[in-house]
Image: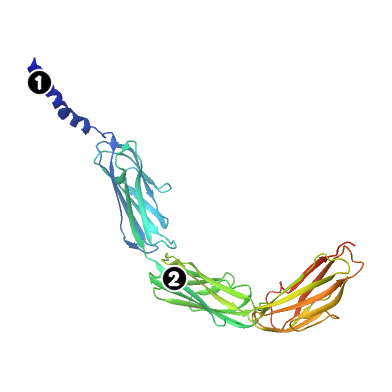
């Protein structure tokens, strides 16, 4: 009896050793495992070159796979040309390779041919492929993704813009010089620079050392620029009347090139001119907006020269309106004539300020009336490009009696 019990116990201890290997060997047999490789026939390509990808998928699992599909995450910057698959078919519109059934240890191959097209800033083309569908459970997702990349030869285009006179007078002729340089390493083709002239100048003529400039569209069609080469465009314009004291900006930018550009920070430039003149500004206010009949109101007119030049021969007209009677005035610059309403300011330096104070009395019979007092610049020797601030009005509302 003891001998039987001992034999039974020995068998029980042996069962895990005999049975468990068979149990574990069956784990995962219903799953699928794949290995994917993706290669490209070029490490470096120019825009316009043709490249060919070769995608290989191998069923490394222990079961046959069904319903297998591979997705090719197609990079922007490539144009599809053709494809060839030894299993299933490839749909370019969806970028899906429907492999179908793939037996264990079997492989399938797909080749895709594409053309490199232009895309600014893209230097490396990445092409990722992955298992996107299979009927069986996936056992190893890490092995089911593969990437192939190549470098796109770029052309670093840089542009500068200068002007021969940064402080012209109105009606002066000035000349802009635009220089385009290709810092490489690739030659550039199909280059277009956009140079639309600002509204405050009038086109006279242009001269392009390479290509042609269209003043209407603003396009300088440069064409091809070799690595290390430069091209220049000069444009002659006249500064318009009415631009005194204005700042005129003239921006230019690289608008297009067939090659990607490795540095987009140097693709634009601006030439700035400040037209000679003085930007005069006028304000007008009062110390009492609701005076009573017989009350005294003080108007304060302030004239400021915002430059950039000193100004001379300045005249401001400020006629005391009906309903008010002139009492006195103080001008810290020049003189005021109450009979004509003319404040002869004279000269005012860049950044200078002049003030006129007028004291008036509210006439009888004006109760409830609204009286407007207006001061305006009527003359200055320097041109003023912004006349919107050359007059100022203020209103007093006479109280009821």
Residue 335: which disc? none
Dot 2 or dot 1: first in sequence order is: 1
Residue placed at 57% from the left, 73% from the top? 250
Q: Please tell me which residue is depicted at 86% across the width and 69% down the height of the picture.
A: 295
**Left or right: where does residue 99 sit relative to residue 280?**
left
Give the residue at mark 2: 157
In 3D space, how far apart are the residues under numbered discs 2 and 1 (Cα atoms)? 89 Å
When the figure is inspected, residue 50 is found, relative to residue 325, above or below; the finding is: above
Position of 235 relative to 294 (above/below): below
Q: Is residue 335 above or below residue 39?
A: below
The image shows residue 84 at horizontal and vertical percentages of 33, 49
**Left or right: 70 in relation to 382:** left
Residue under numbered circle 1: 7
Can residue 194 be seen from the camera position used here? no
Q: Residue at x 60, y 73 (%)?
A: 198
Of marks 2 and 1, the one in the foreground: 1
Q: Secondary structure at mark 1?
A: helix
Q: How is the image coloured?
A: rainbow
Residue farthest toward the top in the current orientation of the protein = 1
Is 332 or 392 nearer to us in this picture? 332
Instruction: Name the one closer to the observer, 10 or 367.
Output: 367
| Badge 2 density bin: few <14, some 14–19, many ≥20, Cα 10 Å | many
Q: Position of residue 135 (x, y in %)?
A: 34, 36
Position of residue 122 measured from the top left corner of the image (x, y, whole percent): 41, 61
Where does residue 276 sit, x and y in percent of width and height? 63, 81
Mark 2: secondary structure: strand
- Relative to residue 222, is residue 133 depicted above or below? above
Q: Quadrant of residue 375?
A: bottom right
- Mark 1: few, some, or many residues within 10 Å (few <14, many ≥20)? few
- Counting every numbered tag in the picture gives 2
């Amino acid at each position: 009896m003891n001998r039987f019990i001992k034999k039974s116990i020995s068998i029980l201890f042996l069962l895990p050793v005999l049975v468990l290997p068979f149990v574990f060997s069956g784990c995962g047999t219903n799953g699928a495992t794949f290995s994917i490789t993706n290669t490209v026939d070029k490490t470096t390509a120019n825009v316009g070159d043709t490249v060919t990808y070769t995608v290989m998928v191998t069923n490394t699992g222990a079961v046959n796979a069904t319903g297998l599909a591979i997705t090719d995450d197609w990079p922007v910057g490539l144009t599809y040309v053709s494809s060839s698959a030894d299993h299933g078919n490839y749909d370019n519109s969806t970028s899906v390779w429907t492999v179908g059934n793939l037996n264990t240890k079997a492989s399938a191959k797909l080749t895709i041919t594409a053309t490199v097209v232009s895309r600014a800033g893209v230097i490396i083309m990445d092409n990722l492929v992955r298992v996107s569908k299979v009927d069986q459970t996936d056992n190893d997702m890490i092995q089911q993704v593969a990437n192939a990349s190549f470098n796109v030869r770029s052309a670093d285009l840089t542009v500068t813009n200068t002007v021969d006179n940064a402080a012209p007078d109105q009606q002066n002729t000035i000349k802009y010089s635009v220089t385009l340089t290709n810092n490489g390493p690739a030659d550039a083709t199909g280059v277009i620079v956009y140079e639309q002239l600002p509204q405050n100048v009038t086109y006279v003529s242009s001269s392009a050392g390479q290509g042609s400039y269209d003043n209407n569209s603003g396009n300088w069609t440069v064409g091809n620029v070799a690595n290390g080469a430069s091209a220049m465009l000069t444009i002659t314009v006249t500064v318009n009347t009415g631009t005194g004291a204005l700042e005129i900006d003239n921006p230019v930018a690289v608008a297009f090139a067939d090659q990607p550009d490795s540095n987009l920070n140097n693709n634009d430039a601006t030439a700035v001119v400040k037209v000679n003149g003085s930007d005069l500004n006028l304000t007008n206010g009062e110390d009492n907006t609701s005076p009573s009949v017989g009350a005294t109101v003080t108007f304060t007119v302030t004239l400021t020269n915002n430059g950039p030049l000193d100004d001379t021969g300045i005249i401001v007209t400020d006629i005391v309106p009906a309903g008010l009677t002139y009492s006195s005035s103080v001008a810290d610059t020049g003189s005021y004539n109450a009979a004509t309403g003319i404040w002869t300011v004279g000269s005012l330096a860049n950044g200078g300020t002049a003030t006129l104070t007028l004291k008036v009395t509210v006439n009888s019979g004006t109760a409830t009336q609204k009286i407007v007092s207006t001061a305006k610049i009527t003359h200055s020797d320097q041109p003023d490009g912004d006349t919107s601030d050359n007059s100022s009005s203020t209103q007093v509302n006479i109280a009821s009696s």
